[in-house]
Amino acid sequence: MAASDRRSPLPTRAPRKILDKEKFTGYEVMLDVFPDVVCWGILLVPKDVKPGSAGLSSSVSTVWKGYRRTSLQRTQKTRYAIYKGFGTRLAERGFVVFAPHHYYRGGNRFRQVAAAGISAQEDALRLVVAQHEQLLSWLKTQPFVDSSRIGFYGLSYGGFSAQRLPALVPGYALSINSAEFNDMVLKKSSVHDRYSYPFYNTYEVFEWNMANTFNYSDLAALIAPRPFMVERGHKDSVAPDEWVASEYAKVRRLYVQLGIGDRTAIEFFDGPHAINGIGTFAFLHKHLNWPEKKP
């Protein structure tokens, strides 16, 4: 039986109001997925929202300290300055935003959970897929969300999700991978480059037989023909520009060969491992067909 077949019925519990800003209201939402497994996060609803508005599931988790509020904080004085409050900024532009909490936090604790899952022949990503299937099912019941226009935008480990979840969950209309897109086979296998995972305490990233199956251009091919974008800072220490550009070139070639070259893009900017929020915001407005509404 597939994980999605065991999901709980949609819950009746009401969202809890936690934010009241000038242009949007924030709610904490918790959805039952399986017994003892929930999907939870923060929903931002613009105050002038109309039925059928564009939605956005913005994954905000990072490998170390990911937390659902990080994409909402606009201050540049915290460790979360790399997010640049992009969830808040998008809500101010008229997008309905859901910032989910993922399990990628707690130092080695989430890695130990992932390892335990493998020993039980379960993949932790399957739980995340089920969480997002439940999330999309719930969003579709909200009168202010157009279920055909829900995108995914994730930074860092959120980019990890942005590469995989839309490939596995067809309900996402587009995907943006920020600060994580890579030649992932090289990054996971090279013992000659300082960027590579063998030099870091990230043992959960090694995926069985990935080099013979799905590199990141292949995962992007599973997202196609839906729009797909990469956001990349020149100073991002995750990998050199050359690794990112060469892998993305395969994505670009596929989209062009399919006659949909206008549905993919990459934005390089002079910055670090962070949200830039310029070309990506324009990409969201264009491909979610939502008129630009500058704050």
Image (cartoon, rainbow, N blue to C red):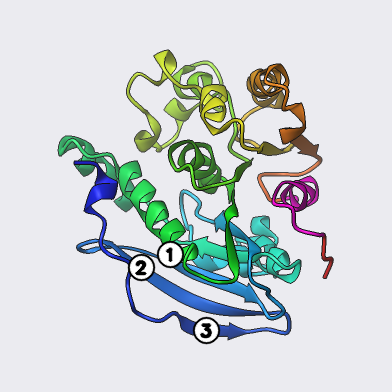
Find out whether the residues at labels 1 and 2 contact each other: C-beta distance under 8 Å: yes
Q: Earlier in the sequence, mark 1 or mark 2?
A: 2
* Snapshot quadrant of residue 30: bottom left
Asked if residue 201 is positioned above or below residue 105 in the image, the reply reads above
- State the CA–CA distance, disc 1 to disc 2: 8 Å
Q: Which mark is residue 138?
A: 1
Q: Which mark is residue 3?
A: none
> Residue at the spot x=51%, y=78% of the render?
27
Kindly identify the amino acid type of the residue bearing the numbered disc 1.
Trp
Over which residues does the magenta segment extend?
276-291
Counting other residues with Cα less than 10 Å from the Cα at mark 3, is it few (<14), some (14-19), or many (20 or more)? few
Find out whether the residues at labels 3 and 1 contact each other: C-beta distance under 8 Å: no
* Whether residue 81 is visible: yes
- State the CA–CA distance, disc 3 to disc 1: 19 Å
Circle 3 is placed at which residue position? 18
- Percent of width and height locating residue 181: 60, 33
Circle 2 is placed at which residue position? 31
Asked if residue 212 is positioned above or below residue 31 in the image, the reply reads above
> Residue at the spot x=46%, y=57% of the render?
136
Q: Nearer the viewer, mark 3 or mark 1?
A: 1
